[in-house]
Image: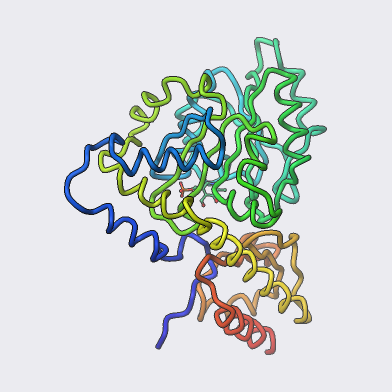
């Protein structure tokens, strides 16, 4: 029997074939380690083509490491990072941001995964008060953990606010490609052009394997980050295999193609779910995640067939995610199973 696709996470998808092929191509002969190889030079050039010449780019293995290392690099331990209460930083990094940066996370309540300037404003009262951690970075996630996206104007507003008050804007872009596909913008449009200072750029959820990057839009901010990366145990000796993946993703339109497909499949799923009585979609479906409230007994039935996460158990809210490899047929099969689970 053909195994069913997982709707649990875009992390569960395989590595994209083109990307695997690029790694095989890079797997010829010897290459200097730690990034002094032609694949890494080409990948860095590719990042400059997308984000502009004046960047500092550093490849890492995980998104958590990218977030934590760049935040640790631009802060001091008495400072604070402002983020949403839904942020990966806050919920899914096992306290690593606090451990490695020493900073306090100041989390703001968010119903849709986004934070807004009027929520951050009251925190400014701490600036200059020696008893309080000093807000230094605002961290936003694009696309958010709830699958929603910040519009360019929203990012610009937060960036301007941050800069007016001596803070930096960090973007957790684990799913930046999905956000760019959703808003039909370039990668630069949502980041450097909108005032982001430092980006954790996600490759894994878009078809790569253990390939993430930190991008500093002001190289001065990223100065000496190579040492922070090494101390963070994220300097790959066989860097060429990470770099080859980024080349495959970014040199043509693969990043966009993958993101468009993943988003479209979530949109299709939401369209079908909307026709099933008793199901309530709880977040706007703007990228590749569908959040829905469905009866507990239907969740139990469906879980016998498909693996997925219950997001909020007391609310019977589930998260279903699509990925670059999800097909129309997968969605029809899954939606059929949902209908069946809802029927009795
Ligand atoms: C919003 C967000 N940021 C970062 C990450 C990176 O996580 P990891 O350290 O597992 O690569 C994830 C992965 O699920 C994520 O959803």
Q: Whole-percent x and y of residue 229?
A: 38, 30
Q: Nearer the viewer, residue 8 or 46?
A: 46
Above or below, 206 against 136 in this view is: below
Identify the colour scheme used: rainbow
Using residue 229 as the reference point, say whether residue 117 is left or right of it: right
Quadrant placement of the C terminus: bottom right
Going by the picture, which residue comes out furthest to the right? 118
Residue 191: quadrant of the picture: top right
Q: Whole-percent x and y of residue 90?
A: 58, 40
Above or below, 28 against 99 in this view is: below
Residue 296: quadrant of the picture: bottom right
Q: Nearer the viewer, residue 68 or 86?
A: 68
Q: Residue at x 66, y 17 (%)?
A: 132
Above or below, 94 against 158 in this view is: below
Q: Whole-percent x and y of residue 255?
A: 52, 56
Q: Residue at x 39, y 66 (%)?
A: 17
Q: Residue at x 35, y 40 (%)?
A: 40
Quadrant placement of the N terminus: bottom left
Q: Whole-percent x and y of residue 38?
A: 31, 41
Q: Residue at x 70, y 50 (%)?
A: 149
Above or below, 7 against 113 in this view is: below
């Amino acid at each position: 029997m053909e195994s069913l696709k997982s709707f649990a996470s875009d992390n569960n998808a395989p590595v994209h074939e083109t990307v695997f092929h690029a790694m095989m191509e890079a797997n010829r002969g010897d290459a200097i380690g730690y990034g002094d190889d032609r694949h890494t030079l080409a990948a860095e050039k590719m990042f400059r083509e997308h984000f502009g010449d004046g960047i500092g780019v550093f490849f890492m293995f995980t998104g958590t490491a990218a977030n934590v290392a760049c935040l640790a690099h631009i802060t001091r331990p008495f400072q604070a990072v402002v983020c949403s209460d839904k942020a990966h930083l806050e919920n899914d990094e096992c306290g690593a941001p606090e451990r490695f940066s020493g900073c306090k996370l100041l989390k703001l309540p968010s119903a849709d995964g986004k934070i807004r300037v009027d929520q951050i404003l009251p925190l400014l009262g701490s600036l200059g008060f020696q008893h309080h951690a000093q807000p230094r970075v605002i961290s936003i996630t694009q696309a958010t953990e709830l699958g929603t996206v910040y519009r360019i104007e929203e990012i610009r507003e937060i960036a301007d606010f941050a800069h007016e008050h001596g803070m930096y804007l960090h973007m957790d872009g684990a799913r930046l490609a999905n956000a760019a596909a959703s808003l039909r913008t370039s990668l630069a449009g949502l980041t450097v052009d909108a005032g982001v200072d430092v980006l954790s750029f996600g490759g894994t959820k878009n078809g790569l394997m253990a390939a993430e990057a930190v991008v500093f839009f002001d190289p001065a901010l990223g100065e000496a980050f190579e040492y922070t990366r090494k101390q963070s145990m994220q300097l790959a000796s066989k860097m060429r295999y990470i770099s080859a993946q980024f080349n495959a993703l970014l040199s043509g339109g693969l990043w966009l193609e993958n993101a468009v497909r993943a988003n479209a499949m979530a949109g299709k799923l939401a369209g079908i779910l909307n026709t099933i009585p008793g199901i309530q979609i709880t977040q706007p479906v703007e990228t590749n995640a569908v959040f829905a409230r469905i009866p507990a007994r239907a969740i139990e039935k469906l879980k016998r067939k498909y693996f997925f996460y219950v997001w909020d158990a007391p609310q019977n809210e589930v998260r279903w995610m699509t990925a670059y490899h999800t097909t129309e047929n997968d969605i029809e099969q899954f939606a059929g199973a949902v209908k069946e689970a809802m029927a009795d």
